[in-house]
């Protein structure tokens, strides 16, 4: 898949043993590491879409640590060499992957697991409650050319 300019991914190596499993997500010596803002965890119920939104400053680092999600990014940036490109990943328990979304790229995700999926984000900026760096669009009615509905067949 051709990636949106500035989007990067990192396959996560799962190390299992008789006690369970471990996988590192992001280290300060990783090529993807930029800086630390905060770490937060969110859940998404099956079939629910959390998106579209973008940030003017913040860069997100998403990992689904339980269940599965469909993570989608759309490049609507003026002057970007990948303007108009959509990227789609199915990540989580069955496909451990970190996806880094640059500033100004619209993104969102849809829960695919019962009863919920658990998503970890390591953004480069802390959340400002009084002045959030978050700009939203309706996930089903916007200028973004993407249909969140399930595709059977």
Image: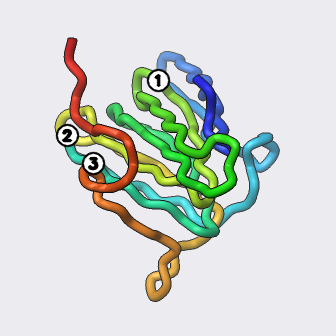
The alpha-carbon separation of the residues under discs 3 and 1 comes to 19 Å
Mark 2 burial class by Cα count in 10 Å: few <14, some 14-19, many 20+: some
Give the image location of residue 86, x and y in percent.
49, 37
From what the image shows, is residue 90 above or below residue 78? Answer: above
Q: At x 62% / y 33%, what residue is drawn?
A: 3
User: Which residue is labeled 1 in the image?
Assistant: 95
Instruction: First in sequence, mark 3 or 1: give its number.
Output: 3
Mark 1 burial class by Cα count in 10 Å: few <14, some 14-19, many 20+: some
Q: Which of 127 and 131 is in front in this view?
A: 131
Q: Nearer the viewer, mark 3 or mark 1?
A: 3
Q: Which mark is residue 49?
A: 3
Q: At x 43% / y 60%, what residue is drawn?
A: 53
Taking the view exactly as shown, the residue that stands out farthest to the top is 153
Q: Which of marks 1 and 2 is in front?
A: 2
Q: At x 56% / y 23%, what residue is drawn?
A: 14
Q: Which of 55 and 62 is in front in this view?
A: 55
Q: How is the image coloured?
A: rainbow
Q: Which of 85 and 98 is in front in this view?
A: 85
Q: What is the secondary structure assignment of the residue under circle 3?
A: strand
From what the image shows, is residue 129 above or below residue 59? Answer: below
Give the image location of residue 100, x and y in percent.
61, 45
Instruction: First in sequence, mark 1 or 2: give its number.
Output: 2
Q: Residue 47 carries which label?
A: 2
Give the image location of residue 20, x and y in percent.
46, 24
Q: Residue 150 carries which label?
A: none
Mark 3 burial class by Cα count in 10 Å: few <14, some 14-19, many 20+: many
Left or right, 74 with reference to 136: right
From what the image shows, is residue 149 above or below residue 44? Answer: above
The alpha-carbon separation of the residues under discs 1 and 2 comes to 19 Å
Name which quarter of the figure residue 110 lies in: top left
């Amino acid at each position: 898949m051709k990636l949106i300019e500035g989007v990067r991914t990192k396959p996560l190596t799962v190390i299992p043993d008789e006690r369970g499993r471990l996988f590192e997500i992001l280290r300060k010596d990783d090529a993807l590491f930029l800086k630390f803002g905060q770490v937060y965890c969110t859940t998404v119920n099956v079939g629910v879409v959390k998106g579209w939104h973008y940030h003017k400053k913040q860069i997100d680092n998403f990992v689904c640590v339980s269940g599965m999600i469909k993570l989608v990014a759309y490049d609507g940036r003026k002057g970007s060499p990948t303007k108009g490109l959509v990227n789609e990943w199915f990540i989580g328990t069955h496909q451990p992957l970190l996806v880094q979304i640059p500033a100004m790229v619209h993104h969102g995700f849809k829960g695919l697991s019962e009863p919920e999926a658990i998503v970890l984000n390591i953004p480069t900026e802390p959340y400002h409650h009084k002045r959030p760096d978050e700009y939203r669009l309706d996930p089903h009615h916007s200028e973004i050319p993407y249909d969140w509905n399930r595709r059977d067949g």
